[in-house]
């Protein structure tokens, strides 16, 4: 705290900047200035400095360069609370989808022989390198989640995590189930809730952009079994589940188990 205000930092790693843009566009950000000093947030504050100490650090993006490994370690040292913001920071993001391939192969596909000033690495979640205290899920997270977490920390309390899937919100809205009724590969059963079942409410199958639920309840195996019964191959199931969950240590093993059982 400084002059009774909480010191906040917002840092970007490899990302599309969509998370911070989502929050920077909020009207409520003006009210935040009464309660908080923004020590670092290049998108909204010209006088930003990554080296300042903060009470709350929001980190967007996946770790995809050697420089970013050093940056997150520095942020962790200078922050009391670290919040991973969005699927890139929490799960490694869509850029981790190709992590079953070699870095050189991916690099050549995208950049050819192009040279850059940084040292690239395969995309990884922030938690791989530093302790994360709280997670804001989504691509990007919902504004209400940001306000809830920030408001709760500002009054000295701790926000709750979400431990139930998109299906709960979907059924509460009275949607018909596109997985059961249309046989489409909806990832709602294993994806952490909070988006109010946005895609199924428009009759579009969830692709899991908020990532799999924690607490060992992301049942990749039971959903893979259902997808298999609907005619999807193992490769198709893995490809779909990996979009936002490429770093989940249980995904491959659980899906493989279903196909071994049936062989
Ligand atoms: S989580 Fe989504 S919106 Fe946020 S930075 Fe990553 S790609 Fe962009
Ligand atoms: S449509 Fe998808 S999110 Fe909705 S209940 Fe069915 S599986 Fe769950
Ligand atoms: S329904 Fe699924 S893909 Fe759509 S916003 Fe929610 S979590 Fe993301």
Image (cartoon, grey):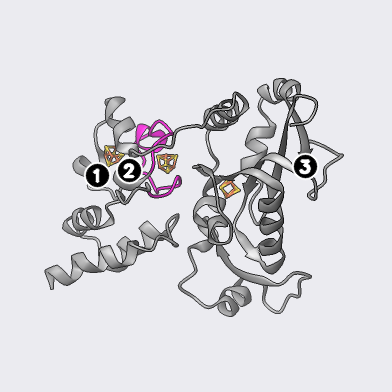
Image position, residue 243 (x, y; %)? 44, 57
The earlier-in-sequence mark between 3 and 2 is: 3
Main SS of residues in magenta: loop
User: For residue 244, which quarter of the picture?
Assistant: bottom left
Residue 195 lies in magenta, yes or no? yes
Identify the disc placed on residue 93.
none
Residue receiving disc 1: 179
Q: Residue at x 67, y 55 (%)?
A: 13
| Quadrant where the image shows the C terminus | bottom left
Identify the disc placed on residue 40.
3
Residue receiving disc 2: 188
Image position, residue 150 (x, y; %)? 60, 30
Image position, residue 43 (x, y; %)? 76, 40
* Mark 1 vs 2: CB contact within 8 A: yes
- Disc 1 under 8 Å from ligand 2? The reply is yes
The earlier-in-sequence mark between 1 and 2 is: 1
- Disc 2 under 8 Å from ligand 2? The reply is yes
| Quadrant where the image shows the N terminus | top right
């Amino acid at each position: 705290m400084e002059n009774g205000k909480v010191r906040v930092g917002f840092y970007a790693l490899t990302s599309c900047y969509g998370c911070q843009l989502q929050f920077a566009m909020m009207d409520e950000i003006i009210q935040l200035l009464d309660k908080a000093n923004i020590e670092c947030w290049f998108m909204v504050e010209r006088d930003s400095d990554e080296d300042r100490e903060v009470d709350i650090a929001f980190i967007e993006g996946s770790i995809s360069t050697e420089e970013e490994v050093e940056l997150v370690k520095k942020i962790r040292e200078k922050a009391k609370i670290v919040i991973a913001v969005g699927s890139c920071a929490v799960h490694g993001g869509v850029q981790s989808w190709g992590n079953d391939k070699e870095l050189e192969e991916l690099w050549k596909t995208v950049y050819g022989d192009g040279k850059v000033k940084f040292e690239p690495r395969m995309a990884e979640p922030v938690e791989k390198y530093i302790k994360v205290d709280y997670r804001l899920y989504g691509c990007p997270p919902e504004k209400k989640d940001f306000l809830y977490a920030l408001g709760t920390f500002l009054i000295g309390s701790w926000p709750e995590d979400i431990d139930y899937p998109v299906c709960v919100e979907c059924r509460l809205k009275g949607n018909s189930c596109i997985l059961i009724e249309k046989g489409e590969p909806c990832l709602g059963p294993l994806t952490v809730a909070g988006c109010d079942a946005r895609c199924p409410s428009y009759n579009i199958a969830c692709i899991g952009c908020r990532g799999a639920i924690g607490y060992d309840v992301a049942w990749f195996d039971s959903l893979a079994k259902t997808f298999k019964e609907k005619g999807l191959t193992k490769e198709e199931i893995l490809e779909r589940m990996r979009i936002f969950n490429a770093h989940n240590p249980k995904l491959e093993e659980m899906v493989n188990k279903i196909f071994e059982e049936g062989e």
